[in-house]
Amino acid sequence: MNKEKICNAVESIRSKTDFVPEIAIVLGSGLGKLADHIENPIVIPYEEIPGFPKPTVAGHGGKLVLGKVGESNVAVMQGRVHLYEGHSPENVVLPVRTLCMLGIKILILTNAAGGINPAFAPGELMVIRDHINLQGNNPLTGPNDNSFGTRFPDMSEAYNKKLNDMIVECALENGIDIRNGVYAGMSGPTYETPAEVNMLRIIGADAVGMSTVAECIAANHMGIKVCGVSLITNMAAGLSKTKLSHEEVKETADKAAEYFIKLMFNVLERVK
């Protein structure tokens, strides 16, 4: 863990604005349009923040947007980096740790995911009840900095149940169907084989993706409440009649943008 790098990022942001966010949201593949609706936005490209890794994947804008949603002070990460882009786990979670040090109390993680549960369908949303870390690493590996958190953080409620219940409540109030399930985090960048998907189904996963898990671990380590939503953009290998592609992911995300944004704004206005 590079505390100096994180502190430099925090100082850089504070040199640009005295805005203090209460809630942060990380926007997954193709979901960045939400950031366009923030009130009085302060936009900081990642390349202007020392140490912030810049996304290389289409659908990840690479901007930090600070502003208001209703009465809430919000920080929006328009895109994230992934392990498969060649980043270390500590670099993957550096932006989230930076937001934690800036003062957030709640982190909302979103992603595009492949559906494993046969009851799911592309275009549906899933509240992340729990995750399975199959990425082959953990962002807390190495010496622990006790000023960030304990050496052995508890993960029995990695995704806050009250926040998850509130997301479901907001969805129902807005007439949006929503599932709940377990997210399996893989390293990528290849999509899973049908045999791997079958394994994931057997061990209890409802959806699979290549992000989110490390960020959730790092935020829990720092005492931040976490919740998460996956957009099911496709059915996983072996469950789909067509070959998987990132274009399909972006296309489904574009179609879901209206109700995804509606739900997230309702959540951001209500959560405290």
Image (spheres, rainbow, N blue to C red):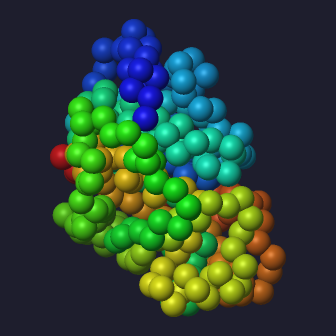
6 left or right of 135 in image = left
Q: Residue at x 25, y 65 (%)?
A: 157
Q: Nearer the viewer, residue 131 or 76?
A: 131
Residue extending farthest front: 143
Residue extending farthest top: 15
Q: Can the viewer see residue 262?
A: no
Residue 97 sits above or below residue 270 on the image: above
Q: Nearer the viewer, residue 135 or 15?
A: 135
Q: Residue at x 49, y 40 (%)?
A: 90
Percent across and percent down for residue 94 are 46, 35
Percent across and percent down for residue 171 are 34, 67
Q: How many marks?
A: 0
103 left or right of 46 in image = left
Percent across and percent down for residue 240 are 72, 84
Percent across and percent down for residue 229 are 42, 62
Q: Nearer the viewer, residue 94 or 128?
A: 94
Q: Nearer the viewer, residue 241 or 262?
A: 241
Asked which quadrant contains residue 98, the reply is top left
Q: Can the viewer see residue 151?
A: yes
Asked which quadrant contains residue 148, the reply is top left
Asked which quadrant contains residue 7, the reply is top left
263 left or right of 33 in image = left
Screen quadrant of the N terminus: top left
Residue 136 sits above or below residue 34 on the image: below
